[in-house]
Amino acid sequence: MSQAATGSSNLYPPFYGLTGGIGSGKSTVAAHLAAKGAVVLDGDKVAHLVMAPGTEGLEAVVNAFGRDILGPDGAVARGRLAELVFSNRHMLKKLTAITHPLIAEYVSDEVRKIREGNPKPPLVVFEAAVLLESGWNVWCDQVWTVSVEPRLAVERMIQSGRLSHEQVTARMQFQFSNAEREQKSHQVIRNNGDLPSLLAQVDALWRSFLEKHPPPSSLAHS
């Protein structure tokens, strides 16, 4: 990502990073921000796009890991790939060395298009679990972290039926701790309670954001 195309500039709209560990509720926060008018770029969906059939990303991943990671439709079998990389730190680094530059390029292009287009949203949000681990935060005007007690995160993921206890804890080992994320963030959203409590925090941050970042006069009167 380039500074001019993303954050750390006076360009409009601002570019914020949204992160949090597995089971933190960051996707719920992202959806709430989107409902308020922000454009959300979902890191997981971008990863899908850069590894879609026919892309250089897919070709590179297949060259690195073999065709066994593909499903019958020729697309990456995400569960199979996750099982491989989240059991071996070397494999994970191998994957991210391929995908992270492609994700950064895609996000940078999308932000540029949004800033060049009209009407402009008040905010662009990049939601990514590994925003800080990947160093993408350096291009963000601000970073917001959704933080939850690890015990609750594990419980929520198991209850959702998406991952087993072993799978959740394995992925946690490759992510920053709450303390590490919070230390590198501008705002921390606590999600140890219920949904209304979580959304109330987001509402307060959104009000503060709008007060501090009104649209440029050229947009306000366009």
Image (cartoon, rainbow, N blue to C red):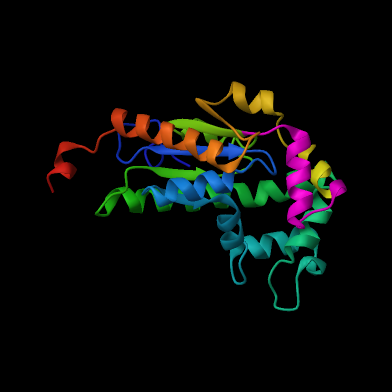
Write the residue at 83% across / 55% down: 83
Whether residue 22 is visible to the viewer of this picture, yes or no, is yes
Is 125 on the left-hand or right-hand side of 153? Answer: left
Q: Main secondary structure of the magenta part?
A: helix
Is 24 on the left-hand or right-hand side of 14? Answer: right
Write the residue at 55% across / 56% down: 46
Q: Position of residue 197 (x, y in %)?
A: 55, 36
**Magenta stretch holds residue 143:** no
Position above or below: 203 against 74: above
Residue 70: quadrant of the picture: bottom right
**Magenta stretch holds residue 160:** yes
| Extreme residue toward the left, this view | 221
Q: Position of residue 91 (x, y in %)?
A: 80, 48
Q: Position of residue 74 (x, y in %)?
A: 70, 75
Question: How many numbered marks, from 0 up?
Answer: 0
Q: In front: 28, or 82?
A: 28
Is 113 on the left-hand or right-hand side of 137? Answer: left
Is 161 on the left-hand or right-hand side of 8? Answer: right
Whether residue 87 is visible to the viewer of this picture, yes or no, is no
Q: In front: 51, or 216?
A: 216
Write the residue at 70% across / 43% down: 22
Which region of the structure is painted magenta?
147-166
Q: In front: 205, or 77?
A: 205
Q: Position of residue 68 (x, y in %)?
A: 82, 68
Write the residue at 70% across / 78% down: 73
